């Protein structure tokens, strides 16, 4: 039997269960608001959102691999394209642009023209250091770590802070060799 062809982002998005976008956006906003109330420090909220995203990404990669039929990417550039065109489309209904590769091919930017998490959001002056969508950086970091890529993901631009787009910088720190729980020769 021939292997299944990988699905495009649109095909995967059409086949997955979805929740109402407004409900999702408002629920996320309520969660961020509660974190701000509980933790009081914007830096702590940023850390908590990143950690929550990491925990989600660790689990989300399984669903992504099962439903998208994407095979192992041959390099970091292919990984970036799959994230931008299939991953973001599958889970958020948007696509991202991959830009600004460094000379070594270990760092790139994901530019989002649209971000469903920020509908209805205005940051007050007291929250100007808040990376409202920091959960996304954690999701990327967690998912990539599960496919043996240790990364650093940071926000470069954010429309909530007056920039013209949302931009995440993804840097490959190291490719982690796969470890098997047992040896075949025993």
Image (cartoon, helix red, strand yellow):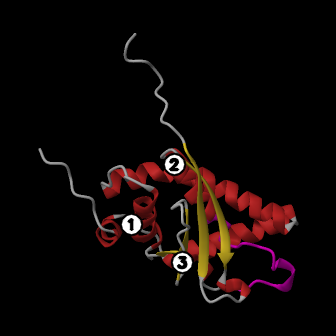
Determine whether 65 is above or below 38 in the image: above
Front residue of 151 and 104: 104
Secondary structure at badge 3 equals strand
In terms of image quadrants, where is residue 151?
A: bottom right
Q: CA distance from mark 3 to mark 2?
A: 24 Å
Residue positioned most to the left? 1
Main SS type for the magenta part? loop
Judge whether residue 133 is colored magenta. yes
**Looking at the image, which is closer to me, 27 or 5?**
5
Task: Name the residue tied to disc 3.
Answer: 111
Q: Secondary structure at mark 2?
A: helix
Disc 2/disc 1 C-alpha distance (Å): 17 Å
> For the point 51% across and 62% down, which residue is it?
105
Q: Classify 10 Å Cα crowding around label 2: few (below 14), some (14-19), many (20 and above).
A: some
Contact (Cβ within 8 Å) of mark 3 with mark 2: no
Please name the residue that numbered disc 1 is placed on.
86
Would residue 163 be found to the left or right of residue 25 on screen? right
Inspect this view and state whether residue 125 appears.
Answer: yes
Residue numbers of the magenta segment: 122-136
Q: Earlier in the sequence, mark 2 or mark 1?
A: 2
The dot on residue 59 is: 2
Q: Residue at x 66, y 56 (%)?
A: 52
Residue 26 horizontal/vertical position (percent) = 62, 76
Which of labels 2 and 1 is toward the front? 1
Quadrant assignment for the N terminus: top left
- Residue 175 in the magenta stretch? The answer is no
Say if 142 sits above or below 125 in the image: above
């Amino acid at each position: 039997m021939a292997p299944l062809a990988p699905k495009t982002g649109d095909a995967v998005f059409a086949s997955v269960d979805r929740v109402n976008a407004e409900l999702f956006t408002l629920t996320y906003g309520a969660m961020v608001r509660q974190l701000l109330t509980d933790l009081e420090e914007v830096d702590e909220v940023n850390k908590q959102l990143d950690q929550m995203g990491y925990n989600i990404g660790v689990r989300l990669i399984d669903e992504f691999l099962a439903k998208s039929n994407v095979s192992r990417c041959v390099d970091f550039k292919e990984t970036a394209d799959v994230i931008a065109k299939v991953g973001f489309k599958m889970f958020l209904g948007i696509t991202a642009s991959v830009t600004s590769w460094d000379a070594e091919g270990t760092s790139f930017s994901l530019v989002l023209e649209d971000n469903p998490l920020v509908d209805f959001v205005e940051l007050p002056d007291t929250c100007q250091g808040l990376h409202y969508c920091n959960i996304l950086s954690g999701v990327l970091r967690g998912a990539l770590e599960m496919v043996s890529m240790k990364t650093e993901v940071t926000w470069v631009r954010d429309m909530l802070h007056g920039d013209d787009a949302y931009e995440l910088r993804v840097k490959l720190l190291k490719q982690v060799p796969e470890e098997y729980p047992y040896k075949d020769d025993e």
